Amino acid sequence: MTFQRRDSSIESQITIRDEHVTRSGDSTLLIGTAGWTLPRSTAPLFPGDGAHLARYGRVLKATEINSSFRRAHRRQTYARWAASVPDDFRFSVKLPKEITHVRRLVRVEALLNAFLCDVSGLNVRLGCLLVQLPPSLALIPDDADAFFSALRGHYQGDLAVEPRHVSWFAGDGEYLFQKHRLARVAADPARMVEAGIPGGWNGCVYWRLHGSPRTYYSAYSDADLSSIVAAVTTARRHARTTWCIFDNTALGAATGNALTLRSRVDAAHLLPAQF
């Protein structure tokens, strides 16, 4: 696995702003896992009372909600999750499959409205929306522009997009990423070289680390984690927000990897004092 430096080159009541995002050159680093399961091997490192999310949120400061891809959560559920974590905790939420994979970004206004209304229950703890696109979805510039214009009309926070068709990595795709301030996800393993490198708008950097060599199962080695630390160091020179989400959750490796990464960047004085 190689981590490379990126190129520098609805209704008003459900409008979601990004007033919580740090500015004036400040940079936020958010390390976490997909979901907040606490494996037996690392559970003692999340002390205290309460449900898993409350314990998780006292130690790690971010999580990626993937369950929203397959089923809707009520606004009250999101609000309950938000109330169980500290003020500086941030959620990234994946857009529903019906929007991205079934409707393929077209004729989705009602679905998008409903999703944004529900996810607004997170309030200021909503840190990012994740748009994962199906591998078969080639870039149709007019459709993509209309979709991201509609989304940006109601949400001004971080937007991370994970395209998986080669057409998104050319000129028209880059234009849309810059126009709509979209971070292009760096995924590991990657379907193509470009997909493993952060791209798009560089105000936000977003890594999705699924495990290597066995996706969802393998833990990252010490050498891999050292490479990630180096990549994070580079990214934070320009990004206002940097996300590192471990999704190698099948055997519980994600939690240990996230804790190790947090310790290493903390030792390198890359994290704010509260970490």
Image (tube, grey):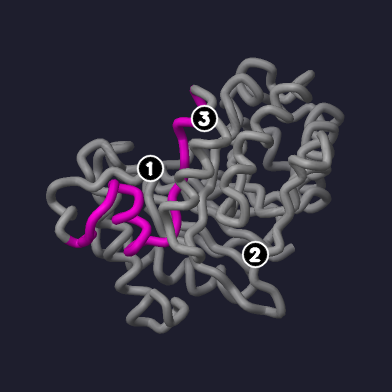
- Which percent across, then down, holds residue 75? 58, 35
- Callout 2–callout 3 Cβ contact below 8 Å: no
**Amino acid type, label 3:** His
**Amino acid type, label 1:** Gly
Q: For this view, does 197 lie left or right of residue 12?
A: left
Labels 3 and 1: the sequence-earlier one: 1
Rendered view: 228 above or below 182 = below
Distance between mark 2 and mark 3 Cα atoms: 23 Å
Foreground residue among 21 and 85: 85
Q: Which residue is mark 3?
A: 73
Q: Which residue is mark 1?
A: 35
- Which percent across, then down, holds residue 135? 57, 26
The answer to which quarter of the image holds residue 225 is: bottom left
Labels 1 and 2: the sequence-earlier one: 2
Q: Which residue is mark 2?
A: 20
Callout 2: 10 Å neighbours few (<14), some, many (20+)?
some
